[in-house]
Amino acid sequence: MTHHKRRDRRGPETARRALRREAPSTVAVVADPAGFAAMRRYTTFTFDDHHHYLRQTEGLLRSLTAQGVHTRVGLFEPDDYAHFCAQERIDPDTSDSRARYVAEIAATGATVRYRGQPLDRLPLLLDGWERREAGERAADTLAGLGPCPGCGKDLGQEALDAAADILDRLVAGAGPGTHHLVCSVTGATGLLAAVLHTGRTPRGGKGPATAEESAFRAVLAAGLATGRPGGVVMRTIRDGNEQVRGWSLNDGRLRPLTEAEVFSAYCTDARTGGPVPPEPGLVHRAGFPLPEHTTEARRHKRRKGDH
């Protein structure tokens, strides 16, 4: 039998276009005006008009899909981006750092297939998927804990109860206003994150938790129970004023960041150590102390580590 090699008779440009169609793309969009205003503090983010930015982004998306590229789109969250850069110790004011964040979104975040849908509807399109995906991953982590070998307690439920209490105290401690919270935990398979928008203290006898709130509690509970590093950032808008607080999550405990640490996370160039212009109108506040919740899962893990 004679074997014949197949020869690619396509020219280099044609071959590259064919390969391009097999390389998927993810584009992250700053979909809301408030987020766009927050991104303008970075000098390398050169857009100064949100509508123009969205038009240019839509042009890029249409160009990619016209080439036959499988294109997905996700949300670029400025608060989560700042926290990501602080964790990774990278300069947030570079295009390379934004590209790394988009790569993280592509790997672990919520995205949808781009089919020409308006970008201002993107948060609604992603909302249900993101809540479900984050909640399921965190729930799997909690379910895998099983019962406490010593006392038989449901370790996952205990962590959820602790997370619910902490969330109540976070929102109550911040006082009246609209609160935007981001909780992120470095999981075994990547970053696990949840976002919560609320204008009241969760629970409090006011009906069952929303899906967004349940997902937030689950992610926080996973961090409390496993001891993996992470953090919570909370922005509060009250009477037209905006302030931000932060807490670091380590070894199953939330430690309040000082005002200087919160300012540093938002206003320091991680690469050079130089200052980054603060976001106009944003006040940096220290996180307030929270009650310590040492779950049985963490106690059991530490006991195993002692032997």
Image (cartoon, rainbow, N blue to C red):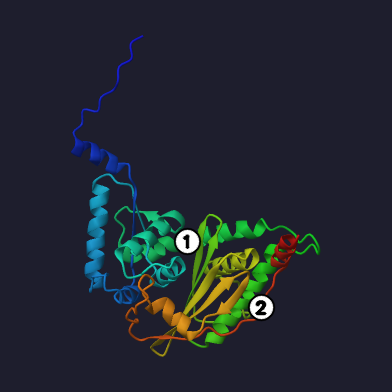
Relative horizontal placement of residue 29, taking residue 296 as reference (left or right):
left
- Res 92 → quadrant: bottom left
Where is mark 2, residue-wise? 292
Say whether residue 207 is visible.
Answer: no
Mark 2 residue crowding within 10 angstroms, few (<14) / some (14–19) / many (20+):
few
Q: Which mark is residue 130?
A: 1
- State the residue in front, 159 or 287: 287
Q: Is residue 69 above or below residue 280?
A: above
Say whether residue 181 is visible.
Answer: yes
Relative horizontal placement of residue 26, taking residue 131 as reference (left or right):
left
- State the residue in front, 53 or 251: 251
Q: Which residue is pictured at 46% across the width and 68% down the height?
A: 87
Please, which residue is most extreme toward the front here?
Answer: 272
- Res 141 → quadrant: bottom right
- Foreground mark, 2 or 1, reads 2
Screen quadrant of the C terminus: bottom right
Q: Position of residue 51 (x, y in %)?
A: 24, 70
Q: Which residue is pictured at 22% across the width and 58% down the height?
A: 59
| Residue type highlighted by circle 1 | Glu
Q: Earlier in the sequence, mark 2 or mark 1?
A: 1
| Residue type highlighted by circle 2 | Glu
